[in-house]
Image: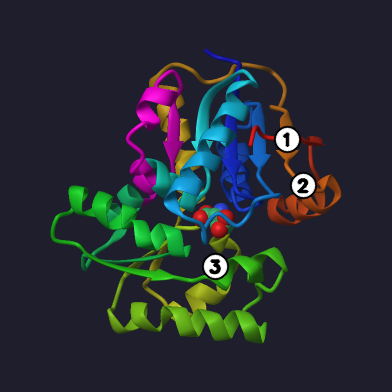
Amino acid sequence: MNNSAIGVFDSGVGGLTCVKELTELLPRENIVYLGDTARVPYGTRSRETIARYTHQDIEFLKRHDVKMILVACGTASSAIMYDRDFAAQHGDMKVSGVVLPAAHAACAATRNGRIGVIATSATIKSGSYGRVIHEIMPDAKVIGKACPMFVPLVENGYTSPDCPPARFFAEEYLEVMKREQVDTLILGCTHYPHLTEVISQVMGEGVTLISSGAELAKYALKTLTFDGELAEREEQGSMELYCTDSVELFSESVERFLGKSINGEVSKCSLKL
Ligand code: DGL
């Protein structure tokens, strides 16, 4: 048993798709969430900058009595996979990103071995998903596509399948996935599950969508169970939310992303820059 919190961070609000799943799978856990809203997006930055931001996010969460840190940002998760100093700096903490759990889920789901990955430019450029998928399934064909317009669409609430810009960009970006006949598509950016409806309509029936944030939450459940570190308390876990820019704007997005009002406090914090 371990009643310390689970720390979760993202460059903004996308990681809340992981938090939503966590609150369903692990309702007794306390959660500390950091959204680095002052510096979002990470997905258009260099690997060095993303890695630096990621270290700062992790250091911030470490100061909040957490037992595990979930990197609920595809871009940050991909950057730390290539950072040689990472293990040395954070070996004292369980830190898990979205790439491994989502890649495993995709390999388990595919029937024809053709897996698509949609994510930010930095994630696709890093090749992180292909690397992990090929370790699990050497013969898999992995097709990656950066979808830079998806994050702003989600941030601004343009997610409905009837919304012309959402439909236009989904058709544009997913054309290659259809042509390559992928039967499994990883939503490698934690914002994308908000576009699930339009993405599944464009991809058609029979294509499995894998939400990387949700897979990370399932992975946390497995790890904490295996390590005997689940929280034990009568009441529901609490939620502490931090952002690095406007609390007001962040709170509005949080409620939209979680689909419910916040059961906890939202504060502004500053990261060591
Ligand atoms: N949260 C980021 C991700 O999952 C997308 C937004 C950004 O570019 O920072 O990759």
Position above or below: 104 against 152: above
Image marks 3 and 1: residues in contact by CB distance under 8 Å: no
Q: Label 1 is placed on what type of residue?
A: Ser
Q: Earlier in the sequence, mark 3 or mark 1?
A: 3
Q: Percent from the top left, x then y, of residue 73? A: 52, 48
Q: In the image shown, does 119 or 79 lie closer to the viewer?
A: 79
Residue 196 got which mark? 3
Q: Percent from the top left, x then y, of residue 182? A: 30, 73
Region rendered in magenta: 81-102
Q: Residue at x 55, y 42 (%)?
A: 53
Q: Quadrant of residue 22?
A: top right
Q: Earlier in the sequence, mark 2 or mark 3?
A: 3
Image marks 2 and 3: residues in contact by CB distance under 8 Å: no
Residue 107 got which mark? none
Q: Percent from the top left, x then y, of residue 154? A: 65, 66
Q: Residue at x 61, y 53 (%)?
A: 14
The residue carrying mark 2 is: 245
